[in-house]
Amino acid sequence: MKRVTSLVIICSVFILVAAGLILLATGTWNGAKHKDSNLPDELFLPSKETGMVTHDALDSISVRSCFSRDPAHEVEPPAWLSRSVLDPLERHAAARRPIPDPAEFPGLVKVEQILSRSGNQRNHCAATRIAEHWFLTANHCVQMRGTSRTVVDMLIIAPQGDVALDDAQIIPVKAGMCHAAWYSPTGKFDDDIALLYVEDTKQLSAVDVPSLDIFEPHMPAHLLTGGVFAGWGKNGDNRFLQSGSARITEVGETFILTDNRGEFSPCVGDSGGPLYVDKEGAPHVVGVLSSVTRDGCPPYDKAFYMRLKTYADWIQTVMKVCVQDDKFVCDIVGDVWR
């Protein structure tokens, strides 16, 4: 009897250890980096009172509702949703400027934060389309830390190398979902990643969803040696798309570091944009631009990207929780407009 009991105990321990290894391998246990997303489905059902997922539910998966569009903008569309007509000289200058073909950078769009009611104060970033209604960008492109400025509105501009041209599409962002661990009290800037939700995507048919390092087998680190970046950053005038090569010098669990050593490199205004690497002849997105070494950019040309591989579970969980029955249900910040 003792031998049988011992055998049962040994088998039980073996099963528990094996189960733990399986959970670790499948990513169900996220450790301290991300909160547990393996929670009861009932927790994520919209509240009967508000019709939205609760703060506690979002907090359990390290998500913060960080932008919600003012419903008043739907009733009376603001002036910043249209472009002023370019004069002939501006059009001529645009025609002479060599601009990369946006088709070479699948999913890439420009993001504008409107920071004043007049629409004159703006902040510029980039984003990548990752699903029908979702765009991936940097956390700091959505919520502004250390400033009293209010984000009045957010826009997606696509798909145009010169965003001032008449045929550039301007689409409002409905909501922003940010990683809750960013800008933690520790002073670290990990988790600089966010998702933008666009409700009406009819004008975005020309913006493809690229290959991403979250929905496919992950790109092995040893293949991450060089890539390509693109954006509307400070190297230009925030109007013209620019691109360049990116020399990858270090790949960590959560980040990818590039150093172009004095050559053309990402700059302020390129934040949130993708890092592409070549995979079987096609551009493959592996990172989201978080920061550069200095505002002056070149020759201060190191760039720090969030590595998508680390955030695959977080990204897919947010998209699943926040859209239920074809309805966006994470509009928590929207309470301030009501």
Image: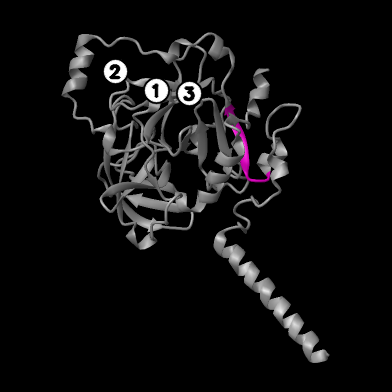
Q: How is the image coloured?
A: one colour
Mark 1, residue position: 203
Separation (CA) of disc 1 from disc 3:
8 Å
SS for callout 3: loop
Front-most of 333 and 187?
333
Q: Position of residue 162 (x, y in %)?
A: 28, 24
Q: Which residues are magenta?
A: 60-67
Question: Which secondary structure type mostly characterizes the magenta part of the structure?
Answer: strand
Tag 2: amino acid: Leu
Q: Residue 64 magenta-drawn?
A: yes
SS for callout 1: helix
**Horizontally, is 283 left or right of 309 in the view?**
left
Rendered position, 201 above or below 310: above
Disc 2 or 1, which lies upstream in sequence? 2
SS for callout 2: loop
Name the residue located 61 percent from the left edge and 63 percent from the top edge. 23
Front-most of 267 and 323?
323
As drawn, the residue found furthest toward the left would be 96
Q: Residue 52 magenta-drawn?
A: no
Task: Sort mark 2 into few (<14), some (14-19) or many (20+) by Cα contacts within 10 Å.
Answer: some
Mark 2, residue position: 165
